[in-house]
């Protein structure tokens, strides 16, 4: 059996700031003289009490990511970590809200810095990164249109997707239809966080009202077997992040996580870390839990990674390179 870290992996659901090592954020806070002690626990990790508090801590950490240079350094640190766990292709959520407050000129500068870091990481470690522009649900539909304007401005081979994250219990997917239409017209692949907190109905609503090809999490679809069947029939891809769900309390244990039941019903499931240091996880650790709890073996992981590569929002040339990286290792 190949060591878990050596299995080549495709990760479709990773928030860039959420992947920031706590020491990296603490270091920036010290450089800038900002007191962020309230977001760290005694063990030095991020400390929060539940989902809404997680969002608060996340946004507080972002306050020290003040310019393109900080995002350059962040991207380098994150990709080094990902590559060390065998990730060969990653799609990361980027929010123009945290990169110049949705000002298009500022956003271009942030994006150039992120891309520069990604090019350097690809040259050093072979890892390929692409970006998904992501408005934040609890910032509201008007702010989402500003993010969508940034998406239209920079859509292409690198910015290849558009999504939405944040507090699923605020507003409805259809409130964001205009922003999603802007992104669709720009040729971007579409995904939305749903069915993490809002139940199966939230998955149905996001799928129907935003016409997304992928759902972020989507795991509460398991409450409605007719929906599970419909997702399977339509080939909708779920970006599952089991470690995140267990840590935030969506499910009380790995054993009770529905990823294997969804897969067995024919749903296209994939595996990601979401915000790895927040959830004390890595891609290797996710795979180790999946092997232990559900008996997933190398053939199963290869199948999951092929599903993810096929669902990636990158162009066909990049997809072919990713598939080759998966095959070469098999
Ligand atoms: O998937 C997790 C938990 N569920 C919902 N949203 C988020 C998650 N991690 C980050 N987010 C949101 C959060 O609002 O995405 C935004 C954060 O501000 C960043 S997108 C680059
Ligand atoms: Zn997420």
Image (spheres, grey):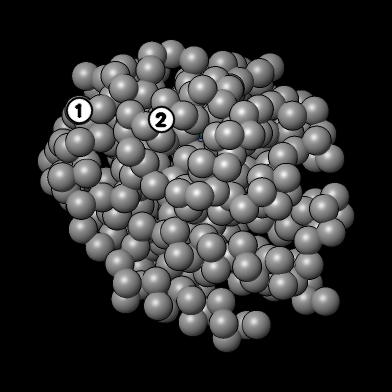
Q: Nearer the viewer, residue 257 or 265?
A: 265
Image x and y of residue 195, in percent: 55, 29
Q: Which residue, given by chain and number where applicable, does mark 2 sit on?
A: 206
- Is residue 239 visible from the viewing direction of this image? no
Q: CA distance from mark 2 to mark 1?
A: 13 Å
Q: Give above or below for 100 relative to 10.
A: above
| Residue 170: quarter of image | top left
Q: Nearer the viewer, residue 166 or 295?
A: 295
- The mark nearer the N terminus, 2 or 1, is 1
Image x and y of residue 169, in percent: 49, 15
Image x and y of residue 109, in percent: 21, 47
Q: Residue at coordinates 66% horizontally, 27% vertically from top-left?
A: 223
Q: Nearer the viewer, residue 34 or 132?
A: 132
Q: Which residue, given by chain and number where applicable, does mark 1 sit on?
A: 178
Q: Is mark 2 within 8 Å of ligand 1?
A: no
- In the rendered image, the quadrant that contains the C terminus is bottom right
| Residue 142: quarter of image | top left
Q: Residue at coordinates 33% horizontally, 29% vertically from top-left?
A: 209
Q: Nearer the viewer, residue 231 or 99?
A: 231
The tally of labels here is 2
In the displayed structure image, the side of residue 207 where residue 330 appears, left or right: right
In the displayed structure image, the side of residue 191 where residue 261 appears, left or right: right
């Amino acid at each position: 059996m190949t060591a878990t870290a050596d299995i080549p992996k495709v990760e479709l659901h990773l928030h860039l700031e959420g992947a920031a090592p706590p020491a990296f954020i603490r270091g920036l806070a010290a450089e800038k003289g900002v007191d962020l002690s309230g977001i760290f626990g005694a063990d030095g990790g991020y400390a929060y009490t539940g989902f809404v508090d997680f969002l608060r801590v996340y946004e507080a950490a972002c306050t020290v990511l003040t310019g393109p240079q900080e995002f350059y350094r962040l991207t380098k640190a994150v990709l080094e970590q990902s590559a060390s766990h065998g990730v060969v292709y990653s799609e990361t959520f980027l929010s123009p809200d945290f990169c110049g407050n949705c000002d298009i000129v500022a956003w271009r500068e942030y994006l150039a810095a992120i891309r520069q870091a990604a090019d350097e990481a690809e040259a050093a470690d072979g890892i390929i990164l692409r970006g998904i522009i992501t408005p934040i649900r609890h910032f509201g539909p008007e702010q989402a249109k500003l993010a969508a304007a940034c998406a239209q401005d920079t859509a292409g081979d690198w910015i290849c997707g558009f999504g939405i994250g944040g507090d699923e219990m605020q507003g409805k997917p259809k409130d964001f239809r205009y922003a999603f239409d802007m992104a669709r017209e720009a040729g971007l692949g579409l995904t939305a966080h749903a069915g993490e907190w809002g139940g199966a109905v939230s998955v149905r609503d996001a799928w129907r009202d935003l016409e997304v090809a992928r759902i972020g999490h989507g795991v509460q679809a398991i409450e409605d077997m007719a929906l599970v069947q419909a997702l399977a029939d339509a080939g909708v891809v779920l970006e599952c992040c089991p470690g995140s769900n267990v840590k935030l309390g969506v499910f009380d244990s790995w054993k009770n996580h529905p990823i294997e039941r969804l897969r067995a019903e024919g749903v296209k499931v994939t595996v990601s870390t979401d915000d790895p240091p927040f959830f004390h996880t890595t891609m290797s650790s996710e795979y180790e839990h999946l092997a232990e709890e559900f008996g997933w073996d190398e053939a199963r992981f290869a199948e999951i990674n092929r599903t993810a590569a096929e669902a990636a929002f990158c162009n066909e040339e990049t997809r072919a390179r990713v598939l080759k990286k998966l095959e070469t290792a098999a």
